[in-house]
Amino acid sequence: MSDDLSLDLFPEPEPEHVEVEASVDESEKETVGDPKVWSVSQVNRAVRSLLEDSVDPLWIGGEVGTWTRSRPGHCYFTLKDDRAQMRCVMFNRDAQQLPTDPEEGMKVRVLGALTLYEARGEYQLVASRIEAEGAEGLWRLAFQKLRATLTAEGLLDPERKKALPRYPAVVGIVTSSTGAALRDIVSVLRRRAPWVRVLLGATRVQGEGASVEIALALEALAATGEPDVIIVSRGGGAVEDLWAFNEEPVARAIAACPIPVVSGVGHEVDVTIADLVADLRAPTPSAAAEAVVPDAVVLMEGLREMPSRLAQGLRGTIQRRRSGLREVLAGLRMRVERRIMPVQQTIDRATGRMERAMRSALELRRLRVATAAGKLDALSPLATLQRGYSVARSRTGGVLRSVQDFAPGQPFELRVRDGEVSCEALETREAGPS
């Protein structure tokens, strides 16, 4: 600090306003003629009162030196520049508001009140707020740390994101019951899909502990098993207002949810950890509602056009199937012809050989028949008749071969070369030995 700033912080008090002496016990007042002697405690107490009463809370800029957080949650650190340093403390009630602990060497500005720790006689700054230099400072640092952790665990991988149902019947909403986000979402759902049933998981969406409440509301809604899809949402605001959606409990609850989750937090420029983990990120609450349900008007138009589209599609399908069938048949015909051709040639050759063999066999049979016929003719009684012989037959048709077959007066037929003669046996005579 400059000398001028030191004078501003510790102005010379007016004599009538100095009340240090009033704090000294009567027993410790100097006696007449003796010098005034203060105890160390009195001096430290007086200096502490002077610091706290004379110096308003102020912003101090510097670089974070050492930083430790005690088990109760109090933070102890040093703030320094290139020429000096000072001790600082931030008690748990204020430290809980930090999105993350500053890193050593980070340039920050600290809002706090000067005081003196009487036990050691050390003055220090009791910090109530810390901001890092640069865009969004500690908020951005905390965002990047958690994002890196979740990325390493694979919770931001596109492959793990679940597809949204096309026609949900029940939509769950995790948001404040009094916020504008809920009104916007319900309005869009009623306009686009009035048949949808809405289940609300009411929760605080900002402030200390809000991230845990959001996570519990999401888990409770998913545990019912009723929603087909869940919207996690809130309206716009500053980084601090949206910060619950950048905290680990919300991120892990979304990642573990068995039901598809759509994140609609803030405005289009606001990107939260919840957006990155969710199965779908919508830029606004209204956009989230539009993303989860179809538009009834569009559905009705589609239904009206469906018959013509179906007919057109059916005609196209039939035409494609017919063309495909023609191609298949043509291909089959060609393949069959290619396979039949060698078989047909083999059959033709076999048929030719068979015809030649049959002609040869027939000719051979004809020759054999002619030969047999000649033999039959030679042995035939008719041939004998041609040579002048005759055959005697009884009236019943039997051949009369011996005189024993005849009786005197017996009629019989005599077959000669060119006809028959009716005869009667007059007498019979047996032939003598030759």
Image: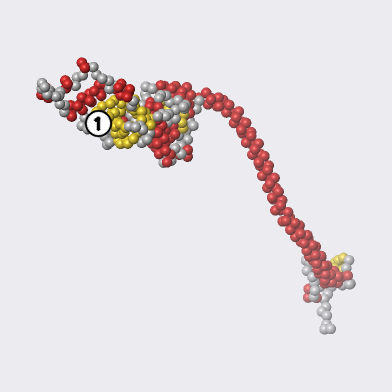
Q: Is 286 above or below relative to 330? A: above
Residue beneath the point at 64% across and 39% down? 321
Q: Nearer the viewer, residue 216 or 350?
A: 216
Q: Quadrant of residue 93?
A: top left
Please, is residue 128 above or below residue 416 in the view?
above
* 228 sits to left or right of 9: right
Residue 69 visible from this viewpoint:
yes
The residue positioned 27% from the left and 36% from the top of the image is 71
Q: Which residue sits at x=64%, y=34%?
A: 316
Q: Quadrant of residue 131?
A: top left
Q: Quadrant of the C terminus?
A: bottom right
The answer to whether any part of residue 411 appears in the image is no
Under circle 1, the secondary element is strand
Image coloring type: secondary structure
Q: Which residue is mark 1?
A: 122
The front one of 106 and 210 is 106
In the depicted view, which residue is nearer to us: 306 or 118? 118
* Residue 177 percent location from the top left of the image: 37, 23
Query: At label 1, which amino acid type do we have?
Result: Glu
Compared with residue 191, is residue 359 higher up or lower down, i.e. above or below? below
Q: Name the quarter where the N terminus is drawn.
A: top left
Q: Name the residue furthest top.
A: 16
Residue sitting farthest toward the front:
33
Q: Position of residue 423 (x, y in %)?
A: 85, 68
Which residue is at a point 29% across and 32% down the rendered structure image? 87
